[in-house]
Amino acid sequence: MEPGKSRIFDTILGRLNLRFPLRYAISDRSSFPGLTHSEYLRLLFETSANLIQLREKDLTIRQLRPLVRQGVKQASERGKIFLVNGNAPLALEEGAEGVHLTSSQSVAEAVLRRREADQPEFLVGRSVHSGDAARQAAEEGADYLLLSPVLRPLSKKDRRAPLGIRTLERIVREVPVPVFSLGGMTLDRLPLMESIGAAGIAGISWASQEATKRLQSPAQE
């Protein structure tokens, strides 16, 4: 089953020669206290992730800006997609491929900012936690959705009951845009995601595990 369609996503995937299902990594430098912000981001780009979402909510815009610039550069060099969490103006200013919005942020506002900046290939994604929220975000113009928690999260405690694979499959069928699965995802679930039409897996834990292995056994250049 094919994921939902997004003209912008399809254009970017074609340019980078990527295809669904994708590996979507969400940053969490707290697991790597010995690294600087820049070193951690560089390490995350060395994993098998196709998309990197910079999600460091405690940093100021002044601290984030050089990391966004670094991410844009590394994404270009490695043929990956780089997204900024929650801050569409910063992502647009620095040339990131897109912004990922929290479940409380407005898709319509981000789409308007994209139009005003005249950057028609800028992705606008959003976190959703139900079928109703997924349908609403798609109607507002989201290019992709991040549905969670599908299974019980591996990286944190979550009081919300897992939605389950069947609910994921139903939502994938109901919304017209790509849907990524977040919560309890491991790389061995990629074939399942492909079979039900999900755009891929998203998460912190699997990316952190890959980064840790890379740090312990760096590849020889």
Image (spheres, rainbow, N blue to C red):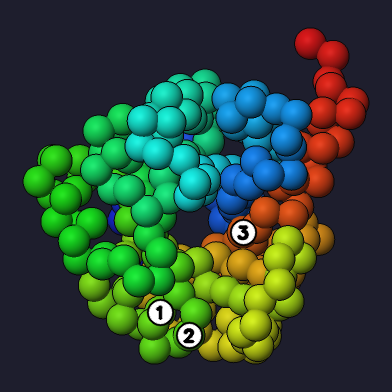
Query: In the rendered image of this protein, does residue 24 appear above or below residue 163?
Result: above
At 54% from the left and 88% from the top, the residue drawn is 170
**Which residue, given by chain and number where applicable, does mark 2 sit on?**
130
Q: Name the quadrant of the N terminus.
A: bottom right
Q: Name the quadrant of the C terminus.
A: top right
Residue that sits furthest to the top in the current view? 221
* Mark identifier at residue 202: 3
Q: Is residue 121 visible?
A: no
Query: In the rendered image of this protein, does residue 142 appear above or below residue 8?
Result: below
* Mark identifier at residue 161: none
User: Which numbered disc flags the more N-terminal residue, 1 or 3?
Assistant: 1
Residue 195 percent coordinates (x, y):
67, 72
Callout 1 secondary element: helix
- Report the front residue among 181 and 194: 181
Q: Which amino acid does label 1 sit on?
A: Ala
Q: What residue type is labelled 3?
A: Ala
Q: Would you say the residues marked 1 and 3 are in contact, meaning their CB atoms lie under 8 Å apart? A: no
Q: Can residue 115 be seen in this view?
A: yes
**Which residue, given by chain and number where applicable, does mark 1 sit on?**
134
Residue that sits furthest to the right in the current view? 217
Callout 2 secondary element: loop
At 32% from the left and 40% from the top, the residue drawn is 91
At 55% from the left and 65% from the top, the residue drawn is 180
**Based on the displayed image, in which of its 4 quarters is residue 37 positioned?**
top right
Gap between marks 2 and 3 measured at Cα: 17 Å
**Based on the displayed image, in which of its 4 quarters is residue 196 positioned?**
bottom right
Query: In the rendered image of this protein, does residue 94 appear above or below residue 221?
Result: below
At 25% from the left and 33% from the top, the residue drawn is 93
In this rendering, position of residue 94 left or right of residue 111? right
Residue 159 percent coordinates (x, y):
65, 83
Q: Would you say the residues marked 2 and 1 are in contact, meaning their CB atoms lie under 8 Å apart? A: yes
Residue 33 percent coordinates (x, y):
73, 35
